[in-house]
Image: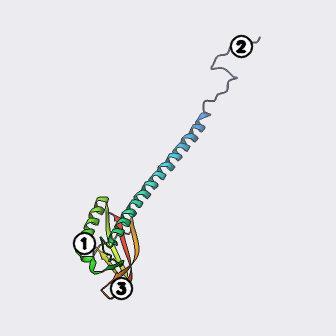
């Protein structure tokens, strides 16, 4: 039997593996970082989509309410009268819309467009070009008792 006097620090037959785990740990940490970035960006995109859908639902609800013959601008034949834009029931509906939009952090504008004419309610309002949501419907606009024209009704919301 061949016995040599070897100590732990002077062992020539041992293999040092002290730094072999560092590249593997680096790859794992990089993978986890990449995974968390993708996860959080997906969550952020999803929350923004939910906010947009909520704004569109508000716009859709109020456009239905405004064009409903019992509550809003529309007549029972489905047409929208220009004279109804300034009656008491419509002004009450606009104040309700204004308070709801203010609570949710939105501002709004109604747009009636026919031929080359656009009517905005409220008048003299500036619509921000970014972050606005619109619901548009084709309607019949009753200008007076005799004259009707095809028109587009739009409810536009944007973040304040």
Dot in front, 1 or 2: 1
Side (left or right) of 91 relative to 52: left
Name the image quarter holding the N terminus: top right
> Which of the two residues, 78 or 47, is positioned nearer the viewer here?
78
Residue 105 occupies quadrant: bottom left
Q: Which residue is located at x 57 percent, y 37 percent? A: 25
Which residue is more in the foreground, 35 or 119? 119
Q: Mark 3 Cα within 10 Å, few/some/many (few <14, many 20+)? A: some
Is disc 3 in contact with disc 2, using a CB cutoff of under 8 Å? no
Q: Badge 2: how crowded within 10 Å, few (<14), some, or many (20+)?
A: few
**Tag 1 secondary structure:** helix
Q: Which residue is mark 1?
A: 89
What residue did someone put label 2 on?
Answer: 4
Judge whether 45 appears above or below 81 on screen.
above
Place of residue 132 in the rendered image (x, y in percent of width and height, measured from the top left): 38, 66
Can you identify the residue that label 3 sits on? 148
Look at the image and tell me whether residue 7 can be seen: yes
């Amino acid at each position: 039997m061949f016995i040599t006097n070897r100590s732990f620090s002077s062992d020539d037959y041992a293999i040092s593996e002290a730094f072999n785990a560092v590249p593997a740990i680096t790859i794992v940490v990089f993978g986890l970082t990449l995974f968390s970035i993708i996860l959080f960006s997906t969550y952020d995109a999803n929350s923004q989509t939910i906010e947009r859908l909520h704004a569109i639902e508000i716009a859709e609800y109020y456009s239905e309410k405004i064009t409903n013959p019992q509550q809003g601008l529309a007549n029972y034949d489905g047409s929208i009268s220009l004279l109804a834009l300034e009656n008491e029931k419509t002004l009450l509906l606009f104040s309700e819309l204004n308070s709801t939009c203010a609570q949710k952090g939105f501002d709004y504008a109604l747009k009636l467009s026919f031929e080359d004419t656009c009517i905005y309610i409220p008048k003299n309002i500036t619509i921000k070009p970014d972050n606005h949501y619109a619901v548009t419907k084709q309607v019949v606009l009753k200008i007076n008792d005799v004259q009707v024209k095809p028109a587009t009704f739009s409810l536009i919301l944007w973040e304040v």
